[in-house]
Amino acid sequence: MADPVLVLTAIAGAAYVFWFAFYRFIVHSPLDNLPSPPSSLFLGNLPDIIHRESHIWWRHVSNTCGPATKITAFCGIKMLYTFDPKAMYSILVKDTELYPKKTAAYELSDRLLGYGGLPAPLLKIDRAQHRRQRKWLNPVFSVAQLRDVSHVFYGVAYKLEEAIRHRVGSQSQDLDVNGWMARATLEMLGQAGLGYSFDKFTEDSTDSYGEALKSFFPIVNHVPLLNLFVMTLANHVPKWLMRRVLRLAVPFPHVLHLLKISETMQKRSTEIIQQKKTALFQGDKALMHQVGEGKDIMSVLLKSNMDAPTDAERLPDEELLAQMSTFILAGMDTTSNALSRILHLLALHPDVQAKLRHELVEARDVVGNGRDVPYDDLVKLPYLDAVCRETLRLHPPLNLIGRRAAKDTIVPLSAPVRGKDGTLVSEIMLPRDTFVLLGLQACNTNKKLWGDDAYEWKPERWLQPLPPTLEEARIPGVYSNLMSFSGGVRSCIGFKFSQLEMSKSSQL
């Protein structure tokens, strides 16, 4: 016999969704006058958004609808999609407090797992807490810190090279390059970030924490509808009701796997932090015997935390756990994909590959004795830098990021768009709780800013002055007129770390 509580919950959930959908369809929104792609009555544009080749659809939307577009989600929910520079500056920099950072991963974790899953500070913190965390984290992502751990990247890259040579042997064969890049990236993050080794690069080496981290995003990608359902309804459906409905999905294997991954991450993260604390109490000699020799980011952060003059200035263990998960999850998938892209593009452009190899060989010859190129010299190599920048321009770690309006507000546009009624729209009234999608890749490939060759991979563009239109647009990104690492106070704090990973690995 069915559980009456679950039956009533399902009925209540269905009734609420029906009422919510009906209400959304009949109520006019200021976004209704914006250009919009065709959408279905109930699912809206979700089939296109979650499609495997969704980037093609987003490019089509950007080209046909322009820099300010209405996107329809589940049950008629209206969202704003924009890659207008002025709008992005307003949302990410000028009025950032009006747009709290919320993600599907946070909403799914919070409503399905509560705070027993991914720690709350991982994906959602208030402004004061964010400032406090940035105060602690900025020094550990400084140039000086990166210089201290740069040797780790060479070590991992050489192990990767040796493992691939052993695997291939004397005969050529196909390799899963993205899989190898994922292993290398995770090991770099583990050693330089946590002082922890995930992978010995042998066939039989396994690590429960590493396996959980590597499978997190692939499993999340297997439940795209659940992700988007939670993300779009999060601010409209009571949390208790959402959690009840989501727990009905627990019998599904992917949801069970997410539960197991979350538990493994929580358990192993706690163990690693305790091991680090023990070594810190034992002194520098104990740290020298650990992976990273006490110079890894987590060791430095823990030491600074222990030296804080008052308890109020320290980060609690819960936040340290959250930062550990954030650091690994945010860096692993994105950086490994970028490395795979670079290798693929170099294979497609042998002329670029030859120029890059020549620059790297010359740099090594200058150092002499077969030694590695030091950090300060590596970051000054112009062609290597151009290859990395151009790859990140065309293929940013994330194509889109999301924000939600905390209250009714107005989004300005750098150039007016023509509404469906024929009028020119120079600013958009954004109702409270409206979800905003910022097109990072669309901004990076905007032909009005970058020129007619914006969709082409041309590292040489970075060796000459950039178009004046780009300089005048005042792109709010933290990295080279690009939105690849977002912008404003909530931009990617580890983008220099990611750059260093790419530069070191590209040398092989």
Image (spheres, rainbow, N blue to C red):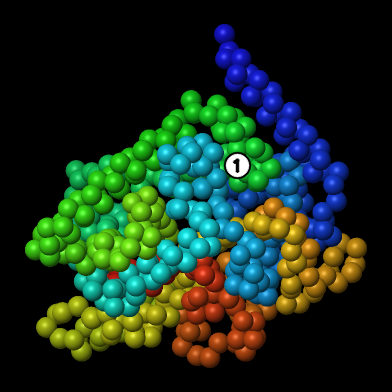
Front position in the image: 139 or 51 = 139
At label 1, counting other C-alpha atoms closer than 10 Å, the crowd grade (few under 14, some 14-19, many 20 or more) is: many
The image quarter containing residue 360 is bottom left
Mark 1 element type: helix
Name the quadrant of the N terminus: top right
- The x, y position of residue 339, in whole percent, is 38, 64
Task: Tell whether 474 sits left or right of 340.
Answer: right
The reply to whether residue 65 is in sight is: no
Q: Residue at x 17, y 59 (%)?
A: 280
User: Residue 382: where, in percent of width, then height?
Assistant: 38, 86
Query: Above or below — where is 178 with respect to 415?
Result: above
The residue that appears at 60% across and 53% down in the rendered structure is 54
**Which residue appears at 38% of the width and 60% of the height?**
312
What count of labels does the image hold? 1
Left or right: where 397 falls relative to 228: left
Q: In the displayed image of the protein, which residue is found farthest to the top?
A: 1
Q: Is residue 252 above or below residue 267?
A: above
Residue farthest along the front direction in this orientation: 310
Residue to which mark 1 is pinned: 230
Task: From the viewer's side, name the closer residue of 206 and 87.
Answer: 87
Tell me which amino acid carries mark 1: Val
Residue 500 occupies which quadrant of the picture? bottom left
Q: Position of residue 155 (x, y in %)?
A: 19, 66
Compared across the picture, whether 399 is left or right of 182 comes to: right
Quick check: 224 left or right of 236?
left
Front position in the image: 90 or 82: 90
Image location (x, y in percent) of residue 56: 61, 58
Q: Residue at x 27, y 42 (%)?
A: 208
**Quadrant housing the C terminus:** bottom left
Instruction: Identify the image quadrant of residue 140.
Output: bottom left
Query: Does the rendering let one see residue 263?
Result: yes
